[in-house]
Image: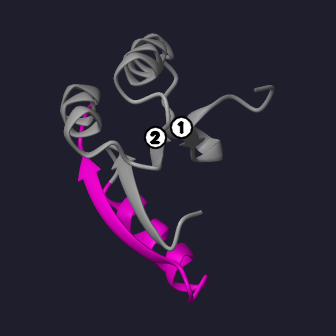
Amino acid sequence: MPENTNILLVGFDDKLRAEFDSALASLGDVHAVVHQAGDFRQACESIRTRSPHLALVELSTDLRPLKAFTEEVGRSSPETTIAAAFRPETFEADV
């Protein structure tokens, strides 16, 4: 990752930011500017104006909004990497 990394968290769970900040702090030498969007509409607006290096998306059981979001990011900010995070209890055991 670049020395000053621009990151967008897209999540509906308040714990996402705290967990991400804790993980980021453990890296020590990474300097990141972290923004957060509560939904995909806000995230798309932020992607267009900030072009983050990374968008970390909270995964839910309905993947349709995620698909539309990734398509929009591909058009408006193709250099943005998208990663997903989820809580295991969100999905059934066989997923």
Rendered location of residue 95, percent (x, y):
76, 26
Give me the C-alpha separation between circle 1 and circle 2. 7 Å
Rendered location of residue 69, percent (x, y):
39, 20
Which residue position holds label 1? 82
Label 2 residue SS = strand
Q: Which residues are magenta?
A: 14-39
Which residue position holds label 2? 57
Q: Residues within 10 Å of mark 2 (few under 14, many from 20)?
A: many
For residue 18, above or below residue 75: below
Q: Residue furthest bottom?
A: 28
- Given this view, does label 1 or label 2 mark the residue nearer the observer? 1
In this rendering, would 88 be left or right of 30?
A: right
Rendered location of residue 64, percent (x, y):
45, 10
For residue 56, above or below residue 34: above
Who is closer to the viewer here, 44 or 95?
44
Residue in view at x 19 percent, y 39 percent:
49
Is 18 covered by the magenta stretch? Answer: yes
Is 11 covered by the magenta stretch? Answer: no
Rendered location of residue 94, percent (x, y):
81, 26
